[in-house]
Amino acid sequence: AQKITQTQPGMFVQEKEAVTLDCTYDTSDQSYGLFWYKQPSSGEMIFLIYQGSYDEQNATEGRYSLNFQKARKSANLVISASQLGDSAMYFCAMREGGQEKLVFGTGTRLLVSP
Amino acid sequence: AAGVIQSPRHLIKEKRETATLKCYPIPRHDTVYWYQQGPGQDPQFLISFYEKMQSDKGSIPDRFSAQQFSDYHSELNMSSLELGDSALYFCASSPIGQGDYNEQFFGPGTRLTVL
């Protein structure tokens, strides 16, 4: 079974609008971490935001916020006030307790239009 | 701030040749991870090292080997290269004491093309 599911292969949003990128995960661990990374066309992986399984509040980092719904096992990324530079591939990833590796979803390609 | 350094950034090899990719983690980071990202794919974990010892292993082919040296840099050695090995290879590093957080800082990647 997929550990991380990103059901939106592509998303379009107009500049200055907000957009939500979906991510659901599957784990039986109580302790885990959820990450979002941005990958522009240049290829590098840029860390955006982290949510721990025991964190009671949703994580926020500037224009990025994570809508964490533990019971539904979802960790959606919300980008507010989209900018042209936000056009990129976005990956959701999970690290399960006691493990080193990150497991990634298949990504969502976001295109921001003027 | 210092980032993860990977070299070379681009590499072109023929089938059945060997390749060595190098990774220099952020200073004071003692854990190194290797990921492989095929064209249009998500990154797949290959292997990780903590304090120069292998700490986790993923879907790394037997043709590949890796190690971490005393200065914490790591090398991924790939032999008998196949066309399917063409991919972007990321190295990431993380510091100790992160607990469940364990943010991994990614390098810019090495793009390997096998002809």
Image (cartoon, helix red, strand yellow):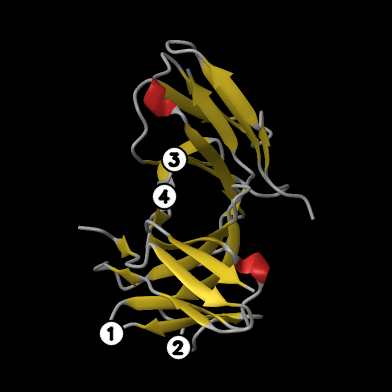
Q: How far apart in space, not on screen, are marks 1 and 4 (Cα)?
A: 26 Å
Closer to the eye: label 4 or 3: 3
Q: In the image, are marks 4 and 2 on the same chain?
A: no
Q: Are marks 4 and 2 in contact (CB under 8 Å)?
A: no
Circle 2: element type: loop
Circle 4: element type: loop
Residue type, mark 4 in image: Asp
Q: Report the disc number at residue B42.
A: 4
The residue that mark 2 highlights is: A56
Q: In the image, are marks 4 and 3 on the same chain?
A: yes
Q: Residue at the location (68% across, 45% down)?
A: B4
Mark 1 vs 2, N-terminal side: 2
Q: Residue at the location (79% across, 55% down)?
A: B1
Q: In the image, are marks 2 and 3 on the same chain?
A: no
Q: Position of residue B8 (x, y in %)?
A: 66, 28
The residue that mark 1 highlights is: A71
Q: Quadrant of residue A11?
A: bottom left
B45 above or below A25? above
Residue type, mark 1 in image: Ala
Near-viewer residue (B14 or B110): B14
